[in-house]
Amino acid sequence: MEDSQKFGKRVFGGFRDVFYIWKREMKKSFYDQGVFIFFILVPLGYPLLYSFIYTNEVVREVPVVALDESHTLLSREFLRKVDATPDVKIIAYSNDMADARQSMREHKSYGIIRIPSDFSDNINNINAFQQAHVSIYCDMESMFYYKCMYSSCTDVSLEMNKAIKIQRAGNTTTNREEEISTYPIEYTNVALFNPTSGFASFLIPAVLMLILQQTLVLGIGLSAGTAVETNRFRDLVPINRHYHGTLRIVFGKTLAYFMIYLVASMWVLLAVPRIFNLNHLAQAPTLILFIIPYLLACIFFAMAVSVLVRSRENCMILFAFFSIPMLFMSGISWPGSGIPTFWRIISYIFPSTFGINGFVRINNLSANLFEIQWEYHALWLQTGIYFFITCVVYRWQILTSRKHVIEHYKEMKSQHQTQQAIESTQI
């Protein structure tokens, strides 16, 4: 009977300590300005900022300069058709390359289309066996400028090739024969799940998942830095009777972070794509079941690495610059097949690698948990591994804190005894 009462008191004390730590972490999340920025303001504002910047999805009407050295009917037709495409807008016609380059230097245009003087002669003179060439010079500040110019000029050249073939065939063929002879292989380009081939539709989902991980790491790191700075012995675990159990600390902190970010993830992953009309084919139950291990893996990962933070500023130095490499290593911004094996293995350390790939398939391809079981199981495995590491880290911090308290007590006792000896000697 007495043993059962002791066990009940221990259980009740454990839950009381968990609640105390949870309440303290919740208060810190809202009253500490730095933590509040990372936990609340950044998840609220960053997704809106990124989505607003890329809301146009594609680049249209890229300003270019035309350099027509041929001055013929065919060259003018080519430029007129290029200007009629939605991706390119010819803003000026230059007489020499120097003027065209100056326009690019001043950022009045982002490309040059140059038609050489022998353009029409090579097309009209069949016996010369020469092909006509069109040169494109593009500002490579962005690949989108190159894509717009290249695709527009290619489409126009294909259409003109078709018309030239029909013209050379004469009146000896029917319309159907002309269609087959000029277009023997018919192809249809269908951009699955991204019909506009937009930048936001494929990049923003990855960025949203990365925001959740990075703000958790930075917020928890900042909180850990504050705890170390305010601790008398520069330890992560404060001197408090509620912090004497490893699982109590881990569960209390995790519960606070998980509750905050479960709400934040619903805003980031459900509301933001709908506000900006991005692709959103995810089923809510599938997304919730997937986001649970992702948040837990991110939380335990952040708590495990927070032991490296010794001041509030350290977390920015240690973790902030990892965002771009993590985005590349995820295999979304850069093809996963092109990532070296070494860096692919390194990417498995971070929950964002599996979180991004799983969420993109759920959100953009309407995948279910069975279809992303590799990412789903990997996140649960990371959750278990980082939970164990977090418990080891905090147990080590508890023992270190106790050691420092005992040493301080012995030092104070020794100083007190020395003082008493001096006073007795004086008497």
Image (spheres, rainbow, N blue to C red):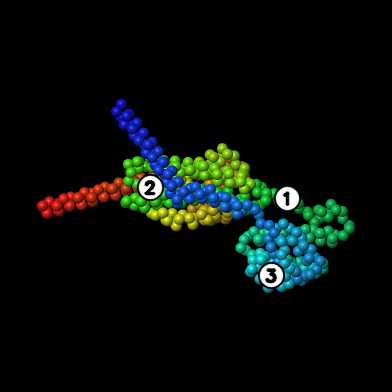
What residue did someone put label 3 on? 100
The disc, 3 or 2, on the residue closer to the chain's N-terminal end is 3
Number of the front mark, 1 or 3: 3
Q: Secondary structure at mark 3?
A: helix
Label 2 – label 1 distance at C-alpha: 57 Å
What x and y, as percent, mark residue 303? Answer: 42, 47
Q: Nearer the viewer, residue 236 or 174?
A: 236
Q: In the rendered structure, which disc, 1 or 3, sits on the residue that comes first in sequence?
A: 3
Query: Would you call the spot at circle 2 few (<14 residues within 10 Å), some (14-19), or many (20 or more)?
Result: some
Side (left or right) of 415 relative to 363: left
Contact (Cβ within 8 Å) of mark 1 with mark 3: no
User: For the residue marked with disc 2, what is the amino acid?
Assistant: Val
Q: Quadrant of the N terminus?
A: top left
**Looking at the rendering, which quadrant does residue 315 occupy?**
bottom left
Q: Residue at x 40, y 50 (%)?
A: 224
- Mark 1 highlights which residue? 188
Q: Mark 1 is on which residue type?
A: Thr
In this rendered view, identify the residue nearer to me: 187 or 354.
354
Q: Is residue 213 visible?
A: no
Q: Which residue is mark 2?
A: 393
Is residue 91 among what the camera can see?
Answer: yes
Residue shown at the point (26%, 50%) measured from the top left: 408
Q: Nearer the viewer, mark 3 or mark 2?
A: 3
User: Distance from label 3 to label 2 (Cα)?
Assistant: 62 Å
**How many angstroms separate mark 1 from mark 3 (CA)?**
36 Å
Q: Residue at x 59, y 51 (%)?
A: 51
